[in-house]
Amino acid sequence: MKYRCPVCMFPSLPYPPSNYHICPCCSTEFGNDDADFTHDQLREMWISNGANWFFGAPPEHWNPWMQLIRAGLDVPRPFTTLRFANNATVEHARIRLLAPKYELCPAA
Amino acid sequence: MPESDCLLQNMNFVLRHEAMLKPFVCVPCEKVIIAKEADVPSLIGLISRLILTVPADTDIPKDAVAPKEWFVFSIWDSEPGDEQREFVLCTQVVYPDKTQFGQIGKLKIPVEPKKRSQMLIQLQGFPIGQAGTYTVRTWVEEKEQLVVGPLEFTIEVEIIRAAAPQKTSPSP
């Protein structure tokens, strides 16, 4: 069974977040760190320190921000605006352009 | 029978057995609306370029992600016999420096006779740690072997640095 860290939202804790177990992702020691701070406060501290992986090598292609987003939490936005833009030349044709051209017959 | 006809027949035989899913459409977009009746899809905001404005004094972390939902929508044409095979649609997002963002998304493609297979891959964030050309790569696997693709499209990410606010001297 896997458990989710209530601080960094790492979804694969092999043990429940209690009894002085330590999260390998954010280093929270459950029963100790979260006795003094709320999980939200601990998360803020982890993020403000760079949201780095704590113990050993992180899982392949691990991304702390995607971990938080997938858990439904907001993440820091280092930008003021984000917008999608087009990157194409634009030509809109009506279907009649595809129809054969008919020459007008000169008046008899 | 001439030898060339024989060869042609053999090639057709091989082609028939090699025939499989074919891409009808594959695009990244901001939203997909699926009509309740008939499951007709409408695509909103096809994505080709993303522009970010960043304060002059702010560094974007290499692993930064914008919490912006987007989709890779695709439809696949099937051929008789495909419904008995197990196809998996794979989706990969690659940074401008060719490293991979996140995991490769894998989703089984349900195939029914005389029907197209409509696939919607939801991505909950967009990587913004590097400016440049991101590649979204899609392919189909069968028994973990590539059988169709890869199809690739690119998305440009442009980062604009906002000018630092100029200090104004106090008026006398």
Image: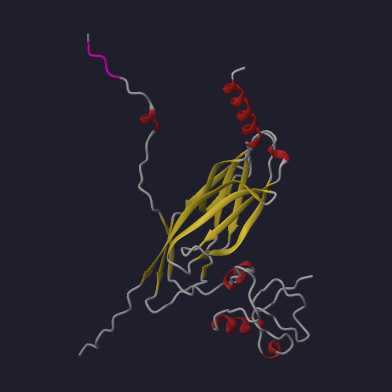
Q: Nearer the viewer, residue A47 or B140?
A: B140
> Is A76 situated left or right of B133 in this image?
right
Which residue is at the far left?
B172
Which residue is at the far top?
A108
Examine the rendered structure and indicate whether residue B28 appears above or below residue A99.
Answer: below
Quarter where residue B103 is shown: bottom right
Residue lying at 64% horizontally and 35% vertically, measured from the top left: B79
Q: Nearer the viewer, residue A26 or B42?
A: A26
Q: Position of residue B23 (x, y in %)?
A: 56, 42
Residue lying at 57% horizontally and 79% vertically, measured from the top left: A51
Q: Nearer the viewer, residue B4 or B42?
A: B4
> Is A79 situated left or right of B4 in this image?
left
> Is B90 situated left or right of B64 in this image?
right
Q: Which residues are magenta?
A: A103-107
Q: Quadrant of the N terminus of chain A?
A: bottom right
Q: Position of residue A29 (x, y in %)?
A: 70, 86
Quarter where residue A106 is shown: top left
Q: Position of residue B161 (x, y in %)?
A: 36, 72
Q: What secondary structure characterizes most of the magenta part?
A: loop
Q: Position of residue A90 (x, y in %)?
A: 36, 45
Residue lying at 35% horizontally and 47% vertically, measured from the top left: A89
Quarter where residue A20 is shown: bottom right
Residue lying at 48% horizontally and 67% vertically, measured from the top left: B128
Q: Quadrant of the C terminus of chain A?
A: top left
